[in-house]
């Protein structure tokens, strides 16, 4: 394999290796949940020479991205040439940027850069990064900055759930973002959160307020899981832009 093809193959392999990050009721502190990036496992092979070849990362559907993003989509995403997929991922993860999807364009497609920019606008990307691939093809990664102080979706309890638990309030955990504070505290989908630092949770809005007040600190959550009451300590991230 010639050096160009080798470098291209390495770039593609690195993009495929990005791990999932990993919040509709989708509100983690008003669309919050701080944590590292949610990058997906190896994507399936992408179409090579056509518009619309965008492949979203698993769990990074448009509705979820809209609820988790730190700011409204920009009119024009920031465009850059990537040097190292792994290094770029690490750098962006530290800034709460999440990999939301990937495209690939054939070397013969003279409009690949323009198409990639349009795709970035279509998916509301904050960052669009180009990587040269084998035979001159172009691999493009799309990123959005998320707010992830908590890292899980949550909803109000249904009347039947409150009746069964004998409680007047609380929230149910929905999706948990990989590598987020909620994930590291071993919160699971279906957990019922009744208290935050020994203070009863009234509803989703109340839980949101309590989490906001403790952003950047640890909270102890009292939860019910499979009929058992347990506690989990969650080290919340700071709000995006704080400090």
Image (cartoon, rainbow, N blue to C red):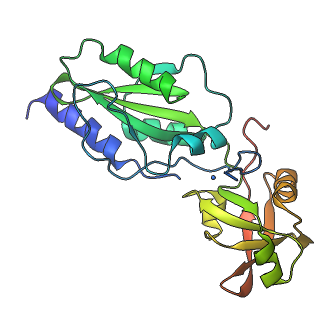
In the rendered image, which quarter contains the C terminus?
Answer: top right
Q: Quadrant of residue 53?
A: top left
Farthest residue, direction front: 160
Residue nearer the viewer, 171 or 151: 171
| In this view, 224 is above or below 195 | below
| In this view, 8 is above or below 182 | above
* Residue drawn where x is 37% and y is 33% of the image: 54
Q: Quadrant of residue 175?
A: bottom right
Residue nearer the viewer, 24 or 149: 24
- Residue 110: x, y in percent? 25, 12
- Residue 85: x, y in percent? 38, 37
- Residue 15: x, y in percent? 34, 41
Left or right relative to 110: residue 28: right
> Taking the image as drawn, is residue 80 in sight?
no
Left or right relative to 174: residue 216: right
Left or right relative to 30: residue 122: left
Residue nearer the viewer, 59 or 238: 59
Q: Quadrant of residue 87?
A: top left
Farthest residue, direction left: 1
> Taking the image as drawn, is residue 158 in sight?
yes
Left or right relative to 171: residue 133: left
Residue nearer the viewer, 43 or 79: 43
- Residue 241: x, y in percent? 74, 35
In the rendered image, which quarter contains the N terminus?
Answer: top left
* Residue drawn where x is 42% and y is 50% of the image: 40
| In this view, 3 is above or below 29 | above
């Amino acid at each position: 394999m010639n050096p160009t093809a080798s470098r291209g193959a390495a770039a593609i392999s690195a993009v495929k290796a990005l791990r999932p990050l990993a919040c509709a009721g989708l509100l983690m502190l008003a669309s919050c949940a701080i944590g590292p990036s949610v990058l997906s496992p190896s994507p399936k092979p992408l179409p090579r020479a056509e518009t619309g070849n965008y492949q979203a990362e698993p769990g990074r559907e448009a509705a979820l991205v809209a609820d988790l993003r730190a700011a409204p989509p920009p009119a024009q995403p920031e465009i850059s040439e990537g040097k190292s997929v792994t290094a770029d991922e690490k750098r962006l993860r530290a800034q709460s940027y999440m990999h939301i999807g990937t495209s690939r364009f054939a070397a013969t497609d003279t409009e690949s850069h323009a198409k990639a920019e349009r795709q970035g606008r279509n998916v509301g990307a904050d960052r669009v990064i180009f990587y040269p691939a084998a035979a001159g093809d172009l691999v493009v990664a799309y990123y959005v900055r998320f707010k992830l102080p908590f890292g899980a979706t949550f909803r109000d309890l249904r009347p039947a759930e409150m009746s069964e638990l004998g409680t007047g309030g609380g929230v149910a955990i929905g999706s948990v973002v990989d590598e987020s504070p909620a994930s590291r505290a071993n919160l699971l989908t279906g957990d019922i959160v009744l208290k935050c630092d020994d203070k009863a949770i009234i509803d989703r809005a109340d839980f949101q307020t309590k989490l906001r007040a403790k952003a950047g600190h640890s909270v102890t959550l009292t939860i019910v899981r499979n009929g058992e009451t347990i506690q989990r300590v969650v080290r919340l991230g700071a709000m995006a832009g704080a400090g």
